[in-house]
Amino acid sequence: MKKFPKNLSDKLELRIANNALRQLPLSIDLVDFASNDYLGLSNSDFVFDTTHQFLLDRNIKKNGATGSRLLSGNHKLYTETEDFIAKFHQSETALIFNSGYDANVGFFSSVPQKGDLILYDELCHASIRDGIKLSNAKAYKFQHNDFEDLEHLILRNQDTIIYIVTESVFSMDGDTPNLEELVRVSDQYNCYLVIDEAHALGVFGSPETSGGEGLVQMLGLQDHVFARIMTFGKGLGCHGAAVLGSPELKAYLVNFARSFIYTTGLSPHSVATILVAYQFLNGNPEAIQALKNNISHFNKMKNSLSLKPIFVRSKSAIQSAIIPGNEHVKSIANQFQEKGFDVKAILSPTVPEGQERLRFCLHSFNSPEEISEVLTLLSNFVF
């Protein structure tokens, strides 16, 4: 085998020296405070059994899609599932992509054009940033959730088409922007607002339904948003994503989004799992309420244990305690695992140096006792 290039070896050695080398973890049987499976649907017998029976009832016995959706891979379940998703999210259309990464890369690399401008929150996910890098549009970041900074950038560039990009729940901080104020700014300057709802699906939703539709619908703002990206690998516990928007947007993405055009479609089983998971959301508000109760209990406990100052303010299922230093935060994460709790350390360069953290992900299936114990341990470890 050829010798590995030295410049690549040097980069790996630097990661090792900074105690920041990423490695694939083994599956461990610990109390889950690490996964994005907020409602426990990845391990749901209901979703698994219902999906299996759904496929048998339809006499669908295919293991793969056989090709891209524009060739042989657009099986009939796609239409049924996309129609259900669009109705669920009060959107005109939905277009399924293979993953949230594919959806963001496909959207941002193809929709904003040369001469357009993308203004994105500085903490937007890597998939959004990668899509923007592939775009021919200019792009500037605005300070995190700072709409005065955003408005300043808009005023400097009023003679162009502007796309404003943010997330409804940020994956590392767990915080949320003031979407009502963001909509006001977007409407005032006739911008195109794009919101990634990956970590809001199944967590936030319409007060009338408690269906986990996302933060945009909870606030009734869906008609003011140009595009929403819904990712299924978190609250739905499966795989894939959808871009919600107008029929024109869907047609445009089918024709120009390369991550959609040039990839094999999802298997019928994957698409059926998405549909069944959405049906679960539609009929089980108690699971979402259990998650809300656990988020409330977590916030009360961190206040009572005087832990609030080290946490990023969040009312979502993502709760981050800032503990600077890769070695320090990894050491505390290891102590949690020794006590039976799967709590992950998030290291630089994933987050900026000095913003290393423990990231607690809450779930509907975590018990109040587990939440109390994990926070009591944190208090003992850091004080």
Image: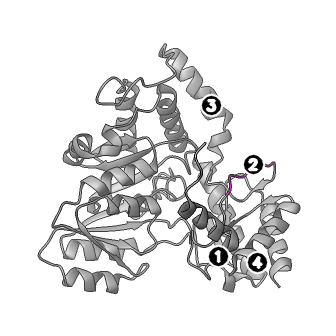
Which residue corresponds to the image point at 78% horizontal and 57% vertical from the top-left? 367
Which residue corresponds to the image point at 50% horizontal and 46% vertical from the top-left? 232
Marks 1 and 4, the one that precedes in the sequence: 4
On the image, the x and y values in percent for residue 40 come to 66, 46
Residues at marks 3 and 4, CA–CA distance in whole angstroms: 40 Å
In the rendered image, the quadrant that contains the N terminus is top right
Crowd class of label 3 (few under 14; some 14 to 19; many from 20; radius 10 Å): some
In the rendered image, the quadrant that contains the C terminus is bottom right
Residue bounds of the magenta highlight: 23-28
Q: Which mark is residue 356?
A: 1
Crowd class of label 1 (few under 14; some 14 to 19; many from 20; radius 10 Å): many
Q: Is residue 219 above or below residue 240?
A: below
Amino acid, disc 1: Glu
On the image, the x and y values in percent for residue 247 come to 21, 44
| Marks 1 and 4 in Cβ contact (< 8 Å) | yes
Is 299 part of what is drawn in magenta?
no
On the image, the x and y values in percent for residue 267 come to 47, 28
Extreme residue toward the left, this view: 159
The residue that disc 2 covers is 26
Q: Is residue 257 above or below residue 296?
A: above
Residues at marks 1 and 4, CA–CA distance in whole angstroms: 9 Å
Q: Which mark is residue 328?
A: 4
Q: Which mark is residue 3?
A: none
Is 25 part of what is drawn in magenta?
yes
* Residue 301 visible, this angle: no
